[in-house]
Image: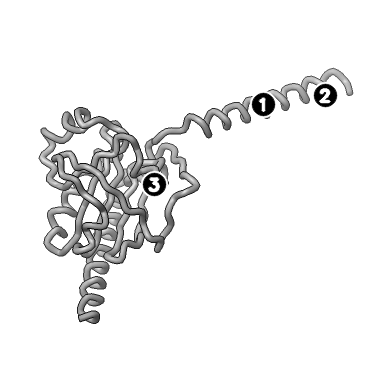
Amino acid sequence: MNLDTKKIALIALGIVFAIGSVWIHYEVKAKIVPAAGLSGGGIIERSGSIELNDEVPDFSATTFDGLNIQLSEFQDREVVVLDFWATWCQPCIRGMPDLQALHDDFDDQGVEVLAVNVGETVETIREFLEPSGYSFPVVIDTNEKISGSYGVFGIPRLLIIDKSGRLRHIEVGYPIAPRELERRNERLRTLLQELTEESESNSSEET
C-alpha cells in the first residue's frame, strides 16, 4: 500500500469514527427539536411512535388552570385534538391562533382541543399564556411523560383522536407558505367535520 493510499484509508477511518461518535451522542442526548416537513428544521421520531388507527395511550395530567384531567374522560366528546408544543418553538407559536380558531369553531360540535406543553415549567408557560388570551386547555407535561408515551420528539405535532380512542390524523410541523397553510387549515376543518358526523351517525345507530 503506497503512502497516498494509506492517507486515504486513514481519512476514511477518521470519518467513520466521527460519524459513529456523533450517532452515539445523538442516540443518548437527543431531545425535543423543532419539527421538519412543513416548517423546516429537523425531526427525530421515537421508535415507539403510534401510527394511524392505533388506540392512543391514556394519560392523567394537570392543566395550566390547575384542573386534573384524564384523556379517557373526554369520551363524551366526539373528537379530541392533541397539539404538542413549547414556547421556544416558533412554528408552534405561529400555529396557536389556528388552534384557537379550531377551539372556537368546533367546541360546540363536540371537539376538545388540548395543547400539551412539552418539557417546560408552569412559570414559563404562564409568561407566555397570560398575555395571549388563548382559551383552550393547556396540559402540563414538564417531565415529558405524555409526549414520551406518544413517541413525540419533533414539535409542533398535532394528533386527531376519534371517539373510540383511535388515532385518525398525524401532522408534524407548520406550513410557511400562505397557500399551503390555507390548504392545511381546510383539510383539518374538513376532517373534523367528517369525524364529528361519523361519531354522531354511529351513536344514532347504537340507540
Which badge, 2 or 3, comes first in the chain's sequence?
2
Q: Quadrant of residue 143?
A: top left
Task: Give the SS element for disc 2.
Answer: helix
Question: What residue appears at the point 63 percent right and 25 percent down from the top-left corner?
Answer: 18
* Camera-side residue of 31 and 106: 31
Amino acid of disc 3: Ser
Q: Position of residue 126 (x, y in %)?
A: 16, 32
Residue 21 image offset from top left, x and y in percent: 60, 26
Q: Amino acid at mark 2?
A: Thr
Left or right, 196 with reference to 41: left
Q: Nearer the viewer, mark 1 or mark 3?
A: 3
Label 2 and label 1: CA atoms lie apart by: 18 Å
In 3D space, how far apart are the residues under numbered discs 2 and 3 (Cα atoms)?
Answer: 50 Å
Q: Is residue 30 left or right of residue 130?
A: right
Which type of secondary structure does the marked residue at label 3 adopt? helix
Which dot, 2 or 3, sits closer to the camera?
A: 3
The answer for how far apart the CA atoms under marks 1 and 3 are is 33 Å
| Three-letter residue code for mark 1 | Phe
The residue positioned 84% from the left and 18% from the top of the image is 3
What mark, if any, has residue 5 been given in the picture?
A: 2
- Local crowd at mark 1 within 10 Å, few (<14), some, or many (≥20)? few
Could you say where residue 176 lies in the image, as x and y percent from the top left?
32, 43
**Quarter of the rendering containing residue 202:** bottom left
- Residue 182 image label: none
Instruction: From the image, tell me which residue sits under label 3.
Output: 149
Q: Quadrant of the C terminus?
A: bottom left
Q: Could you tell me which quadrant the N terminus lies in?
A: top right
Earlier-in-chain disc, 1 versus 3 = 1
